[in-house]
Amino acid sequence: MSVLIFIDHIDGHIKKASLEAMSYGAKIAGETGDTAEGVVLLGGVAPDLAALGQYGVNKIHQVQNDNLQTFDSQVYAHVIAQVAQQTGAKTIIFSNNPMGKAIAPRIAVRLKAGLVSGAVSLPDVNNNFIVKKNVFSGKAYANVKVKTDIKIISLNVNAYTITETSGTAEVVPFNATVEAPKVKVVATNKTSGKVALTEAEVVVSGGRGLKGPENWKMVEDLAESLDAALACSRPVADAHWRPHNEHVGQTGIAIAPNLYIAIGISGAIQHLAGVNRSKVIVVINKDAEAPFFKAADYGIVGDAFEVVPKMVDAVKKLKGTA
Ligand SMILES: Cc1cc2nc3c(=O)[nH]c(=O)nc-3n(C[C@H](O)[C@H](O)[C@H](O)COP(=O)(O)OP(=O)(O)OC[C@H]3O[C@@H](n4cnc5c(N)ncnc54)[C@H](O)[C@@H]3O)c2cc1C
């Protein structure tokens, strides 16, 4: 039997979230005595899949088909379900990112499998397969018992540390029935930031306290000095100060970086819902009563226009790039 891990990529570049999922799945396989196997769906050039053995996967099933060039969750779910059935997978792991969220529930229905979405730690395989997950937008945890034969887990991004070993994976072509996509992509707008928001270790985010788009230069400077991705609150995106793909929160992107720096953001519950899984939160706000300080690990009460340039200078000095 196997633990099957869906390996997600952008144009052949394997996402960090998938490296976490592989490490997580390999650890479960080690505990259950199963093999850790990956599945990769490719419409174009294949990345070096054998090298992914260093994340603990023993075997990778490679499905190559032109129809997979366009992401269609129904087509992808059908293919992954075939791999799961033919390989006898008992546990299937996804990242709880947009792709995983679109595919995992569809496979759960197809395979009559219990699904735990947003897992934050390893399942207790010796105790009824209990999995801990986030609930209420990260405000609480629930321990969920999975009773079905086949179990599906989608792992929260940044919830499990990537572990590397020295192995290589056996790569085997998988002959699946691949339907034509039912969706047609009419345009693709790629984000211009150097670091993808959902993959970023550090995120620098600005809110309405920055007064206008003309003041974002200092936010960009801080992000650049820290190799960070940029984010913003919803009113900032609504006012077109920043693009909507930077909007984080309940109605925007949910992120979980190691460090989230919030500048001139009040900390409304809808904003916190998308960022409160960050490992360390730093808040810069001139109002000492701003709600965000309650969620912060570190806070600076001060005017962003004075604090942020000083931070940029300090980081540059620390890195020797001043
Ligand atoms: C259904 C629903 C969904 C929503 N979804 C989201 C969401 O996904 N994401 C989201 O962000 N919001 C969301 N909102 C909006 C949310 O409720 C808040 O209105 C929003 O987050 C506030 O944005 P802000 O903190 O940038 O602005 P404000 O609330 O106006 O806060 C600005 C902050 O900047 C501080 N400030 C001002 N000047 C300075 C200065 N010079 N230096 C330092 N600090 C300064 C102020 O003290 C204040 O705390 C949603 C609302 C609803 C109703």
Image (cartoon, helix red, strand yellow):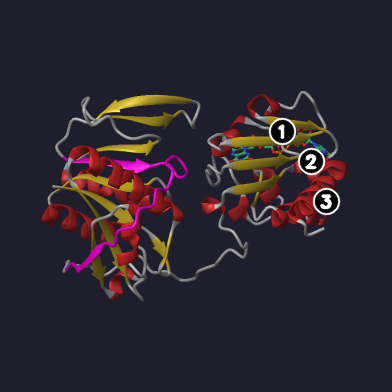
**Marks 1 and 2 in Cβ contact (< 8 Å):** yes
* Residue 177 left/right relative to 19: left
**Residue 182 seen anywhere in this rendered image of the structure:** no
Of labels 3 and 2, earlier in sequence is 2
Q: Note whether ligand 1 is within 8 Å of mark 2.
A: yes
The span picked out in magenta is 150-174
Q: Is residue 21 magenta?
A: no
Mark 2 surroundings: few (<14), some (14-19) or many (≥20) residues within 10 A: some
Q: Mark 3 or 1 closer to N-term?
A: 1
C-alpha distance separating marks 3 and 2: 21 Å
Q: Is mark 1 within 8 Å of ligand 1?
A: yes
Residue 266: give its label. 1
Camera-nearest label, 3 or 2: 3
Residue at the spot of label 2? 209
> Label 1 is placed on what type of residue?
Ser
Query: Which residue is label 3 attached to?
Result: 313
Q: Callout 2: helix, strand or loop? A: helix
> Quick one: 44 or 168, which is closer to the camera?
168
Give the image location of residue 90, x and y in percent. Answer: 17, 44
Please give left or right for residue 227 compared with residue 156 in the image.
right
Considering the numbered disc 3 on the image, is that residue within a helix, a strand or a loop? Answer: helix
